[in-house]
């Protein structure tokens, strides 16, 4: 965490919960957020698509922001089952996660597609949270840093700035496994990502861009991760489904 970058705590609800769960979770967070005078962090929740409008209503005016878990690269058209960034923005989203490893795996998303999605999210006026991360096999083969550099080069939107783009480093082996990256592992990759960003977008923007850690972040490990020099918050899955846990993670950030 640095004093110049405002921490971001993002909750990725994935494909979990029905209307009553979405309402309860978002209203608990909105109530807590509304009570904080000047939060030292930004908070965003990313519910499943059918819950977005409902959650938008619940969190209105609280300071908690709304995000989508994905978006199509185009604004409209014949794409059955897809959701355009313009629609997401229209229902209240100010963030969109793109390139999550579960989408890269489940839907075969390439770096080029992730880049196009991020660019579309930005064009619609949202902040793209671009996810990258190595598998256990890649890490064991000594390719953790090179994999993340390559994904970053291929997925970073063309006109990326610290204002319209956030990077999320999510080691695939740590997602939903309870196995979290050690502080040394996290800082090594985050540092390498920032160094690569310097080459891609210049030192000034790179110094301002937020890089989140994701993968089994919990109240018990969030503090030491977010305290690392190049970790600027978290993309939280499992622990984001519990208001008290998610709030505790946010408090560890600010
Ligand atoms: P997890 O998921 O916190 O459940 O590991 C993180 C993510 O996939 O964004």
Image: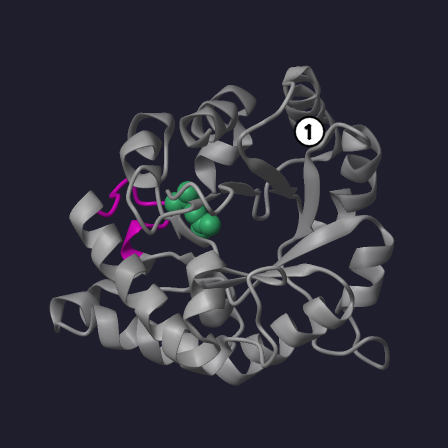
Q: Which residue is mark 1?
A: 26
- Position of residue 131 in the picture relative to residue 68 (left or right): left
Q: Residue at x 51, y 75 (%)?
A: 156
Q: Position of residue 54 (x, y in %)?
A: 82, 37
Judging depth in this view, the residue of 81 and 31 nearest the camera is 31
Residue at disc 1, secondary structure: helix
Q: Quadrant of the N terminus?
A: top left
Please say whether residue 250 is visible from this viewpoint.
yes
**Dot 1 surroundings within 10 Å: few (below 14), some, or many (20 or more)?**
many
Q: Is residue 242 left or right of residue 214?
A: right
Does the magenta portion include 174?
yes
Q: Is residue 44 above or below residue 188?
A: above
Task: Give 156 or 105, whichever is nearer the viewer.
Answer: 156
Picture quadrant of residue 34 = top right
Above or below, 41 relative to 210: above
Residue 134 seen by the camera: no
Which residues make up the magenta segment?
173-181
Image location (x, y in percent) of residue 108: 49, 77
Q: Position of residue 37 (x, y in %)?
A: 65, 19
Q: Quick one: which residue is furthest to the top in this view? A: 35
Quarter of the rendering containing residue 145: bottom left
Q: How many marks?
A: 1
Report the side of 185 relative to 25 (left or right).
left
Disc 1 beta carbon < 8 A from ligand 1? no
Residue 93 lies in the magenta-colored region? no
Q: Residue at x 62, y 55 (%)?
A: 69
Specify the principal SS of the magenta part. loop
Name the residue: 59% across, 38% down. 42
Residue 202 locus on image (x, y percent)? 44, 75
Pick the front one: 121 or 37: 37
Residue in front for this viewpoint, 201 or 242: 201
């Amino acid at each position: 965490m640095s004093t110049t970058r405002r921490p971001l705590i993002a909750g990725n609800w994935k494909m979990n919960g029905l209307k009553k769960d979405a309402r309860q979770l978002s209203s608990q967070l909105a109530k807590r957020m509304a009570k904080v005078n000047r939060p030292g962090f930004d908070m965003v929740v990313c519910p499943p698509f059918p819950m977005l409008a409902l959650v938008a209503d619940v969190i209105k005016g609280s300071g908690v922001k709304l995000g989508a878990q994905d978006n199509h690269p185009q604004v409209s058209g014949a794409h059955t089952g897809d959701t355009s960034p313009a629609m997401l923005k229209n229902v209240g989203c100010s963030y969109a996660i793109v390139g999550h490893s579960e989408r890269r795996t489940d839907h075969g998303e390439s770096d080029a597609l992730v880049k196009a999605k991020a660019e579309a999210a930005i064009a619609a006026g949202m902040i793209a949270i671009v996810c990258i991360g190595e598998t256990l096999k890649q890490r064991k083969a000594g390719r953790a840093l090179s994999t993340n550099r390559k994904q970053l080069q291929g997925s970073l939107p063309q006109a990326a700035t610290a204002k319209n783009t956030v990077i999320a480093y999510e080691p695939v082996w740590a997602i939903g496994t309870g196995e979290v990256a050690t502080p040394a592992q996290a800082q090594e990759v985050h540092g390498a990502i920032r160094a690569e960003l310097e080459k891609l977008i210049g030192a000034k923007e790179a110094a301002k861009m937020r890089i989140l850690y994701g993968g089994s972040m919990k109240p018990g490990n969030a503090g030491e991760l977010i305290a690392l020099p190049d970790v600027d918050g978290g993309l939280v899955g499992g622990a984001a489904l519990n208001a008290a846990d998610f709030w505790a993670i946010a408090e560890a950030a600010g």
